[in-house]
Image: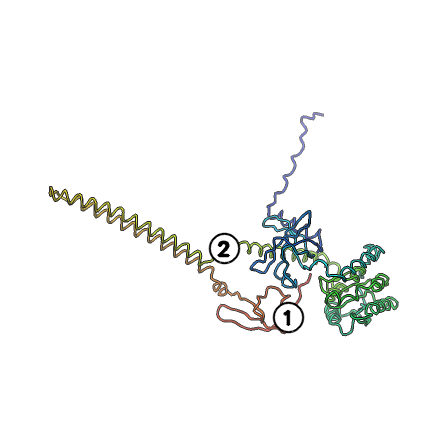
């Protein structure tokens, strides 16, 4: 065999991608690899933009990371952090594609530590974790098609109404069993544990929801009871903990097989109203929504950057006026020089004419030409400046918000005057104000459909 005559086929050329595509792929990879995570650190370089977004750096002794908290989340923070504050944030790791900067998008923020109750909470959490109650291998998967759902909560709790409404909307065929118990006050922890034990003993439901509405750490303390943790861990059926709001965490959450952000979310997790073949579609929808939120967030950040750099129309007009005044002054001086020179020549020629009386026809012709050229120069420059001023006026008119409204857009505000940007700001039977191109209107909200995750 002649090895010199053997040629390997040329490898195919590697695909070439753009920087934008690369950054978007990295952002999706980060968001899928790192779920919402609680991160502690110290606030630094805190800035509150005119749009309401918060920009800051979260740091510790060895490292730091850039963070952004958009207005829709920041307005529910309960406090405005300051330089040097120790905080805990619940954030999504992502990438700001426009600059290629790694950052975290903060969903919730709280102060680090809340006193003796928090210390007691941490001690009990460490104790039960060491006992193995929180180990991932103990967690059980939820049934795919539950027929009966048990609920451990107070009959008077608003959380019960939220759960029943969500279950009726998503899976009206599911049977519901209520195990009533107080969820707050003296001895509530023991009664909650007893209700869970009763549900486990009867074993007449496929999944059990333990829930109550949000509140302070004192209000939720009954769910930080050791008996409740063991009752949840020893329950025969899988347990979903839906205690408090998204930022609230209790011992019951860690002991449960699944923790939900709210009671309504617990009901949504307990039942599956769609077939398995739609699971991949839901995953694609989640990716698309994340990409849209990331794009919207990046666009908002970019808009903030442009806002800082953009001069107001009044300032631009003032600058153009100063330039026009300087050009007018320069033009005036430029016109005076030829005229002075012409007068000097005229005086000199007049003197010579008086002495010799020569024919001054040619000199007069040259003087007329100089005057004509000077007049044309002034007229041309003034026409150019008028055209430039007209172009600037047209650009200013394009930036007029009234023109945007005349194209069919409207500004939506609630009854407090705040601009509405997301369905989460709306409530049924509330009123909205619409500012149109010609006047305004008031409309009522009949219902609000929450976004599906």
**Whole-Å distance between the Cαs marked 1 and 2?**
36 Å
Q: Where is residue 33 in the image (x, y as percent from the top left)?
A: 71, 51
Instruction: Report the front residue among 174 and 87.
Output: 87
313 sits left or right of 182 in the view: left
| Position of 378 relative to 167 (above/below) | above
Tell me if mark 2 has few (under 14), some (14-19) or many (20+) residues whose alpha carbon lies within 10 angstroms of its own. few
Q: In which quarter of the image is residue 203?
A: bottom right
According to the picture, the residue beneath numbered tag 1 turns out to be 427
Residue drawn 78% across and 74% down? 155
Residue with the mark numbered 2: 310
Residue at 62% from the left image edge and 64% from the top image edge: 422
- Left or right: 105 with respect to 322? right
Name the spot of residue 79 as percent of width and height, x first: 65, 62
Q: Badge 1: few (under 14), some or many (20 or more) residues near its Cα, within 10 Å? A: some
Image quadrant holding the N terminus, namely top right
- Decide: is 45 above or below 173: above
Residue 96 image offset from top left, x and y in percent: 61, 51
Choose between 358 and 76: the one closer to the eye: 76
- Above or below, comparing residue 69 to residue 347 in the picture: below
The earlier-in-sequence mark between 1 and 2 is 2
Give the mark toward the camera: 1 or 2. 2
**Residue 233, placed above or below residue 32:** below
Q: Quadrant of residue 363?
A: top left
Q: What element carries label 2?
A: loop
């Amino acid at each position: 065999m002649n090895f010199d005559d053997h040629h390997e086929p040329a490898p195919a050329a590697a695909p070439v991608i753009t920087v934008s595509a690369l950054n978007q792929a990295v952002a999706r990879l980060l968001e899928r690899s790192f779920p919402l995570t609680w991160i502690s650190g110290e606030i630094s370089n805190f800035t509150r933009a005119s749009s309401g977004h918060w920009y800051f750096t979260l740091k510790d002794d060895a490292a730091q990371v850039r963070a952004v908290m958009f207005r829709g989340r920041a307005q529910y923070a309960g406090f405005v952090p300051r330089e040097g504050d120790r905080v805990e944030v619940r954030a999504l790791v992502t990438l700001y594609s426009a600059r290629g900067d790694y950052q975290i998008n903060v969903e919730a923020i709280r102060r680090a530590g809340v006193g003796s109750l928090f210390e007691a909470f941490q001690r009990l959490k460490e104790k039960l974790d060491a006992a193995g109650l929180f180990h991932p291998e103990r967690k059980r998967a939820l049934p795919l098609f539950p027929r009966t759902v048990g609920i451990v909560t107070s009959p008077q709790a608003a959380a019960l109404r939220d759960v029943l409404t969500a279950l009726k909307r998503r899976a009206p065929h599911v049977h519901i069993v209520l195990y009533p118990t107080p969820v707050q006050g003296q001895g509530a922890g023991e009664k909650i544990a007893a209700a869970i034990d009763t549900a486990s003993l009867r074993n007449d439901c496929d999944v059990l929801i333990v829930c109550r509405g949000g509140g302070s750490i004192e209000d939720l303390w009954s769910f930080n009871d050791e008996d409740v943790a063991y009752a949840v861990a020893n329950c025969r059926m899988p347990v979903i903990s839906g205690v408090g709001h998204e930022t609230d965490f209790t011992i019951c959450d860690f002991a449960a097989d699944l923790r939900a952000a709210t009671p309504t979310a617990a009901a949504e997790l307990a039942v599956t109203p769609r077939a398995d073949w739609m699971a991949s579609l839901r995953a694609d929808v989640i990716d698309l929504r994340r990409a849209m939120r990331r794009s919207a967030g990046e666009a908002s950040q970019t808009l903030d950057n442009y806002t800082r750099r953009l001069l107001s129309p009044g300032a631009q007009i003032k600058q153009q006026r100063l330039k026009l005044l300087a050009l007018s002054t320069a033009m005036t001086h430029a016109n005076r020089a030829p005229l002075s020179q012409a007068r000097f020549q005229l005086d000199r020629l007049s003197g010579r004419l008086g002495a010799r009386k020569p024919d001054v026809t040619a000199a007069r012709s040259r003087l007329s030409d100089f005057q004509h050229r000077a007049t044309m120069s002034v007229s041309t420059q003034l026409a150019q400046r008028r055209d430039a001023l007209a172009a600037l006026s047209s650009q200013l008119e394009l930036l007029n918000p009234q023109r945007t409204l005349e194209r069919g857009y409207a500004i939506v505000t609630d009854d407090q005057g705040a601009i509405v940007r997301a369905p989460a700001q709306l409530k049924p039977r509330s009123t909205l104000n619409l500012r149109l191109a010609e006047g305004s209107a008031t409309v009522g909200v009949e219902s609000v459909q929450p976004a599906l995750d």
